[in-house]
Image (cartoon, rainbow, N blue to C red):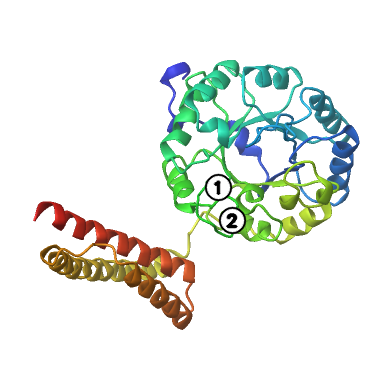
Amino acid sequence: MGGNDMKLEDLKNEWANELPSPLIIAGPCSAESETQMLETARRIKESGAVVPIFRAGIWKPRTKPNGFEGVGVIGLNWLKKVKEEFGFKTTTEVANAHHVAAALEADVDILWIGARSTVNPFTVQEIAEALRGTEKPVLVKNPVNPDLALWIGAMERLIGQGIENIGAIHRGFSTYQKTKYRNTPNWQIALDFRNQFPNIPMIVDPSHICGNRTGLASVAQEALNVGYQGAMIETHSDPDNAWSDAAQQITPEVLAGIISNLKTRKADISGYEDEMEKHRTLISDIDFQLIGLLSQRMKEAEKIGIIKKDKNIAIFQPDRWKIIREYAAQKADETGMSQGFIERVFKAIHEESIEVQNNIMIHK
């Protein structure tokens, strides 16, 4: 099968068959000097960590101008030396046809398309055409905004050019809300992708999700818990003095500690079907009850909407939302559940209640 006849679900992805579990890709956010690259690679090797692929940003797309935007083509020579001296496979980001040509000429083993590129179909098409026919694996990061169709579309553009070795990198999504993450994981979007295309390897990028060092291990483990193949973790010989994203980079020795504690999970549930099915049945029953309760709740919201319309009262009442948030925090403490989760549930219910009342204002 080739060209436009291919579909994502039909890809064999033979490159992934020999991947270690978990697959770890590590190296600095940016290539800064030959010394930095070789020192980082040497220490990763000496740490004993199983890291088959060394990463480094050669070209760095930055949010604002005048920042460090990568050393350019000279850094590809340093990647070559890393491969020759330490035996790593190498990978870097490409963002246009020029990058692709240079990376292929330098025999970089794996290329990845960054989040800022994935969001732009014109850019992805340019990259895909420049990669046409390559057998090298191409990894695609999720777009910066939470849009599953864009992520899938980027991969479809690649297979449209005959590229058959494809993987996905989950690096989180931008949000205007302040959270503990630099880029919120939005796990459900990534899991929706995995459900549709289980044949495409999924790797997590905890460095960009966290934006700091403290959460890397937990995010990497969460990803392995739901069946990801591995993680891309930014690692630097002197992270405090890194030229880009210093806060989220770690030393090779810390990396080795994280890897040693990671636990891969079996996909096969043979022998546990009966026990799991019992709990799934109970969960389904609870879910049906929740739907019934939510239906009742919306009917009460509808009655309130009728009162508001009759009395010419604004739908949104800030004081009421404050009470709901306080109640959510209280119930989280009482039940031992995540306050963030309880707040998200109540927020979704509150937003739906407003929508119900708004429809009453307009149509009744």
Give the residue displayed 46% in from the left and 44% down from the top: 146
Dot in front, 2 or 1? 2
**Numbered mark located on residue 181 in the image:** 2
- Callout 1 amino acid: Gly
Spot occupied by residue 165 in the image (x, y as percentages of width and height): 57, 29
Give the residue displayed 64% in from the left and 51% down from the top: 206
Spot occupied by residue 298 in the image (x, y as percentages of width and height): 21, 66
Residue 202 position (above or below residue 32): below
Q: For residue 282, say whether it is visible.
A: no
Give the residue displayed 79% in from the left and 57% down from the top: 254
Spot occupied by residue 195 in the image (x, y as percentages of width and height): 43, 46
Give the residue displayed 67% in from the left and 59% down from the top: 217
| Residue lying farthest to the left in this orientation | 364
- Taking the image as shown, residue 304 lies to the left or right of residue 82, namely left
Spot occupied by residue 302 in the image (x, y as percentages of width and height): 16, 65
- Residue closer to the observer: 145 or 227: 145
| Residue lying farthest to the front in this orientation | 312
Cβ atoms at labels 2 and 1 below 8 Å apart: yes
For the residues labelled 2 and 1, the Cα–Cα distance comes to 9 Å
Q: Which residue has dot 1 on it?
A: 172
- Taking the image as shown, residue 86 lies to the left or right of residue 311, namely right
